[in-house]
């Protein structure tokens, strides 16, 4: 990840969850729950949440793997990890979550270590998507699944127009009100650069995943890429 993107996420950390609410029209919790289900994490699993942010998906994974499971939440933003740690302290200590400051392009884990993995709103921001998926493939066990949730540009023109209107007229003004206009100005360019669902599937196959399926949701404004390591 670039130092510029790390700086952005450190700056937006205090309002990260609020902004996700506004960006997703309040639906991101539903989509995150779907993502965790697609990862097929089960009780006792050792699971991985990449670009964990303030920990939403990590906590959901922890509930699925239970007291006998283990979750590693990885993010490159120390500010967001601080928030995740505080949230975990205020929640039940029955779950086992380890917070790790690291770059998803160079994960500090052994090969074939994880039974399941998730990533929420992170793939779009990595500087090298193929490399990040290759690293994910490396650390997953044979037969493990990963589910990756992110914003997308809708394929139809009406959806694209609505999304751009929403970003320009609702998200950016709110970010401006919070003093974060420049930080959130990066969203539209990042959506324009982000590979389509089919392109993501192709990249996943190229780095070694045998099965890759992309599920568009929210009229194509969101998508979940589900991967299996054979």
Image (tube, rainbow, N blue to C red):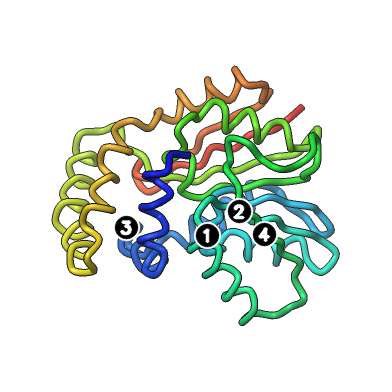
Ranked by sequence position, the earlier of labels 3 and 1 is 3
User: Is 57 situated left or right of 15 in this image?
Assistant: right
Q: CA distance from mark 4 to mark 1?
A: 21 Å
- Local packing at callout 2 (Cα closer than 10 Å; few below 14, some 14-19, many 20+) is some
Q: Residue tagged by mark 1?
A: 78
Q: Nearer the viewer, residue 181 or 205?
A: 181
Where is residue 200 drawn, in percent x and y? Answer: 49, 27
Q: CA distance from mark 3 to mark 2?
A: 25 Å
Q: Nearer the viewer, mark 3 or mark 2?
A: 2
Q: Quadrant of the C terminus?
A: top right
Q: Residue tagged by mark 4?
A: 61
Label disc, if present, on residue 101 of the rendered structure: 2
Q: Are marks 1 and 2 in contact (CB under 8 Å)?
A: yes
Ranked by sequence position, the earlier of labels 1 and 2 is 1
Q: Residue tagged by mark 3?
A: 23
Ranked by sequence position, the earlier of labels 3 and 2 is 3
Label disc, if present, on residue 160 of the rendered structure: none
């Amino acid at each position: 990840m670039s130092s510029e993107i790390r700086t952005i996420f450190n700056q937006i950390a205090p309002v990260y969850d609020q902004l996700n609410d506004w960006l997703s029209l309040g639906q991101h919790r539903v989509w995150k729950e779907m993502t965790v289900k697609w990862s097929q994490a089960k009780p006792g699993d050792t699971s991985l949440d990449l670009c964990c942010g303030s920990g939403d998906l990590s906590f959901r994974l922890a509930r699925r793997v239970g007291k006998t499971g283990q979750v590693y939440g990885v993010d490159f933003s120390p500010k967001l990890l601080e928030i995740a740690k505080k949230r975990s302290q205020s929640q039940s200590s029955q779950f086992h979550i380890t917070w790790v400051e690291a770059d998803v392009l160079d994960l500090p884990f052994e090969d074939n270590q994880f039974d399941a993995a998730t990533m929420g709103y992170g793939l779009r921001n990595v500087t090298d998507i193929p490399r990040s998926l290759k690293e994910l493939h490396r650390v997953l066990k044979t037969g493990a699944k990963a589910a990756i949730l992110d914003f997308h540009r809708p394929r139809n023109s009406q959806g694209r127009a609505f999304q751009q209107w929403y970003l320009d007229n609702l998200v950016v003004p709110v970010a401006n009100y919070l003093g974060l206009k420049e930080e959130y100005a990066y969203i539209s360019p990042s959506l324009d650069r982000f590979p389509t669902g089919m392109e993501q599937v192709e990249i996943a196959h190229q780095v070694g995943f045998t099965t890759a399926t992309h599920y568009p949701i929210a009229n194509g404004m969101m998508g979940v890429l589900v991967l299996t390591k054979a």
